[in-house]
Amino acid sequence: IMLDPCRHFIPVENVKKHLDVLALFKINRMHWHLTDDQGWRIEIKKYPKLTEVGSKRIDGEGTEYSGFYTQEQIKEVVKYAADRFITIVPEIELPGHELAAISAYPELSCKGEPTTPRIIWGVEDIVLCAGKEKPFEFLQDVFDEVAPLFPGEYIHIGGDECPKTAWKNSAFCQQLIRQLGLKDDTTPSKIDGIKHSKEDKLQSYFVTRMEKYLNSKGKNIIGWDEILEGGLAPNATVMSWRGVEGGMNAAKAGHNAIMTPNPYVYLDYYQEEPEIAPTTIGGYNTLKKTYSYNPVPDDADELAKKHIIGIQGNIWREYMQTSERTDYQAFPRAMAIAETAWTQNANKDWKNFCERMVTEFERLKVMNTQPCLNFYDVNINTHADENGPLMVLLESFYPNAEIRYTTDGSEPSKVSILYEKPFVLEGNIDLKAAAFKDGKMLGI
Ligand code: ACM
């Protein structure tokens, strides 16, 4: 599971509680996204301004938002996780998503102009300058301090969402492109079938150079699937987030891949009706859809099967100001991800999973963790076959629940119409449905 304390900071005690719950479901890696445009969250002794300046942002109303982990706190969390058989994989983003660092040390960007950490979400155009030596020196120093804090094999170097505008306009970058002899592709790449620009290749140069440095320190790198663009660093593991293609292409090329496709396992997406759910970034991944994901399809080629080494759910926290909201977004879907990670696809059984979930919800309660509870509700769906009428399908995840509904907007009771099969939607109705067990309503 990936946890993002950059958009909203997470105090150490809350990270520990999160680890307790992950351990309960046998989740054995926590990818800790420690740097981003909106905040730098790890103490680096050689560059004190990263936290003095880069961990603070001032929102539109003038309120300061801040927080970071000292190296002592990082060690404490790493040990706490290890005691629960969880390895922490730190992420230090490069070359994009670095505005917080650039705010502290403006010379890291191409133009070197003063700036501040980003106060809105989304993708930032100001990035580390690939054409200067300073950003490489900076990152090597940062990794000199980060690597010893995390005993695991991997360091995640980000690599996603790095716009190339600044590099196209930078004399430093264009000079390096000429020096390295980088050219725009005239034929599609063998790995992903896309023609890449010389600036994409400059990103590949950047990542490969950092990979070499980290390999020399005994670490392997993981990067988001954009690191495929312009050529993959020789030993990199690819984390496939924009669907499954990046991971499949990497695996077919003999690289390890971790699958975290956003249409299945992004835990910041909605999981229940957006009309009633707290605001999220968007998307729609129900528990059932998350559970349905099979990272290693039967028809995948053998090389791909061998190189898909795991799956991950991502908790991007733009819209999660608190740990309570984080729990609501993460659970129960993280449990579906854990089951997929540890179970051969042929042995997965949605109905059986739902039966076991009833006890798992009790366990979450004991852990003082409040999940999304639409498991106890009825999902109202519509469906039409070609030229067929619009049908209403009602579904409850709760095992063997009775679904009862009304069409006049009144609250359903144990004597309302019993749902037996999909029915035709006719006229203007106000449908309300609820699930019942032994004559008691489960939730609405
Ligand atoms: C990502 O969600 N930008 C990796």
Image: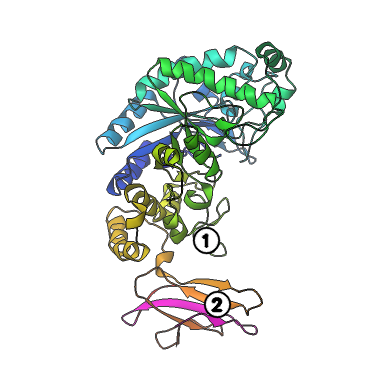
Q: Is residue 369 left or right of residue 127?
A: left
Cα–Cα span, label 1 and label 2? 21 Å
**Marker disc for residue 392:** 2
Q: Label 1 is placed on what type of residue?
A: Ala
Numbered disc total: 2
Name the N-terminal-most of marks 1 and 2.
1
Q: Report the magenta residues as a range.
A: 419-439
Residue at 63% over, 13% down = 132
Q: Quadrant of residue 198?
A: top right
Q: Quadrant of the N terminus?
A: top left
Q: Could you say which is closer to the camera, residue 432 or residue 62? A: 432
- Indicate which quadrant contains ligand 1: top right
Residue at 54% over, 27% down = 232
**Marker disc for residue 159:** none
Q: Secondary structure at mark 2?
A: strand
Q: Quadrant of residue 245?
A: top right
Q: Answer above or below: position of 207 versus 290.
A: above
Farthest residue in the left direction?
A: 83
Q: Quadrant of residue 159?
A: top right
435 in the magenta segment: yes
Q: Could you say which is closer to the camera, residue 81 or residue 342? A: 342
**Place of residue 40 in the rendered image (x, y in percent of width and height, measured from the top left):** 51, 29
Residue at 37% over, 42% down = 14
Judging by the rendered image, the residue that carries numbered circle 1 is: 277
Residue at 28% over, 31% down = 79
Is the shortest distance between ligand 1 and the CB of mark 2 under 8 Å? no
Q: Could you say which is closer to the camera, residue 25 or residue 420? A: 420
How is the protein colored in the picture?
rainbow
Q: Answer above or below: position of 411 versus 225.
A: below
**Place of residue 196 in the rendered image (x, y in percent of width and height, measured from the top left):** 67, 30
